[in-house]
Image (cartoon, grey):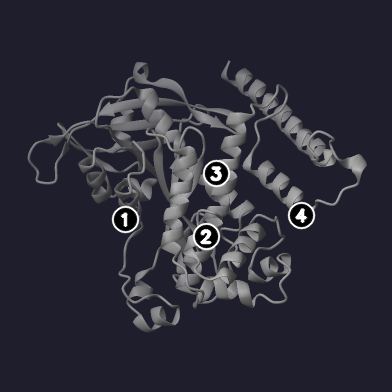
Amino acid sequence: MGRIALRFVRVEPRRRVGLFLVGLLAGLPRVNCWTIAEHAGEASPDGMQHLLARAVWDADAVRDDLRTYVLDHLGDPGAVLVVDETGDLKKGVHTVGVQRQYTGTAGRIENAQVGVYLVYAATGGHAFIDRALSLPKSWTMDPERCRAAGEPGDTRFATKPALAREMITRALDAAVPASWVAGDEVHGGDSKLRIALQERAIGYVLAVACDHQITTPAGKHPAKTLARRRPSRTWNRLSAGVGAKGHRWYDWALIDIAVADAEGGGTVGGQALLVRRSISTGELAFYRCYTPTPVPLATLVAVAGRRWTIEESFQAGKGLTGLDEHQIRRWTSWHRWTILAMLAHAFLAVMTATARAETPSPQGLIALTANEIRHLFTRLLNHTQHGIRHLKAASGVPTALLHWSRWRRRHQDRARDSHHRRQTVQLA
């Protein structure tokens, strides 16, 4: 709150935004202006709704504060900027940006609103630093509809990769320390994004479809065709990172490629096709890669694995800070809700990274998670009236809370150990 307080000139919205952030972290059954206002002890949701819709403050300025906060705690020159989109299912036709479209949230075409998000993934942790609302052509071609939803009137249609380019450019222009960009097939198939990153000498590992055409000295070929030609000795078994159930092992192969530059003369160096093969099913996945300087295969694999951090961020943002639970229709309210939810998520991410760095977990306990940090924070903040026999003499922390925290972490450690043993037997 100290970082963003100056963005609120009047004391009323400054106080209320603090209550709003605490409400987002409170673990309420449903998260909206009604429940947050009730949790804050206010008589009606009018004040919270005013904060999102009409109060005078700049959500983009708070976004910059959020980015600075994340970098101050997680900054890493080798970090990865991960971009992806997520959809929020909606009813009706009046919520800004809504239309029937495919969303991975539902796995099918649904009436949904889609946002593109940028995550800063560093060694110590990961958190959102930017977002953009995807406004379909059905909206941009209907000025009256946009005006009714509060859109400022200067928004043109932009594809999701174009929105990603804009956010990545904004981050790099702000001197965000990062060496890589990762994304899914939507962004890997966009040549403009790849060229923009190459011009800035930023490496990338971007997923592409199996039929993605790749130019080689022998002509154009689909990615899957190049993968089939790889001899068995060129595959390497490497971990793409540690997940909830242990290391994510796959077989990997790297194919050097030459791609004509934008003018068609000569080639752009440092490009390759990275192929991932499932150990159990043999299913293939493909990545377009660019490296300004030579790097080992293990580095590209590690960057490809970092892409999953945005899925973890979506899960935590939606499950812990209400990123997708807004019941708002207008342009300004969407941008304000999402930036505050991202700020609450960043708080959990930073607290988790700090706790893990300063207090390593003893044997038999998994490391503290954002979920556990949120639980402890909420319980300590909202339940401070305890009898003397329930307090730990040294710190005044309720022993019942610490007991349950250790119990959950011990149970999760046993579960993880069981998964590791099962995985070891399967690999053997």
Residue in view at x 23 percent, y 40 percent: 198
Of the image marks 2 and 4, the number of the one nearer the N terminus: 2
Q: 405 left or right of 348?
A: right
Eye-nearest disc, 3 or 1:
1
Label 1 neighbour load within 10 Å: few <14, some 14-19, many 20+ = some
Q: Nearest the camera: 35 or 266?
A: 35
Label 2 neighbour load within 10 Å: few <14, some 14-19, many 20+ = some
Eye-nearest disc, 2 or 3:
2
Label 4 neighbour load within 10 Å: few <14, some 14-19, many 20+ = few
Of the image marks 4 and 1, the number of the one nearer the N terminus: 1
Q: How many marks?
A: 4
Q: 115 left or right of 319?
A: left
Q: CA distance from mark 2 to mark 1?
A: 27 Å
What residue sits right under mark 3 in the picture? 312
Q: CA distance from mark 4 to mark 1?
A: 40 Å
What residue sits right under mark 4 in the picture? 382
Q: Is residue 105 visible?
A: no
Q: Amino acid at mark 4?
A: Asn
Q: Which mark is residue 5?
A: 2
Q: Position of residue 262 (x, y in %)?
A: 14, 46
Residue in view at x 48 percent, y 61 percent: 6
Q: Quadrant of residue 312?
A: top right
The answer to whether mark 4 and mark 1 are in CB contact below 8 A is no
Of the image marks 2 and 1, the number of the one nearer the N terminus: 2
What residue sits right under mark 1 in the picture? 166
Q: Amino acid at mark 3?
A: Glu
Residue in view at x 42 percent, y 34 percent: 76
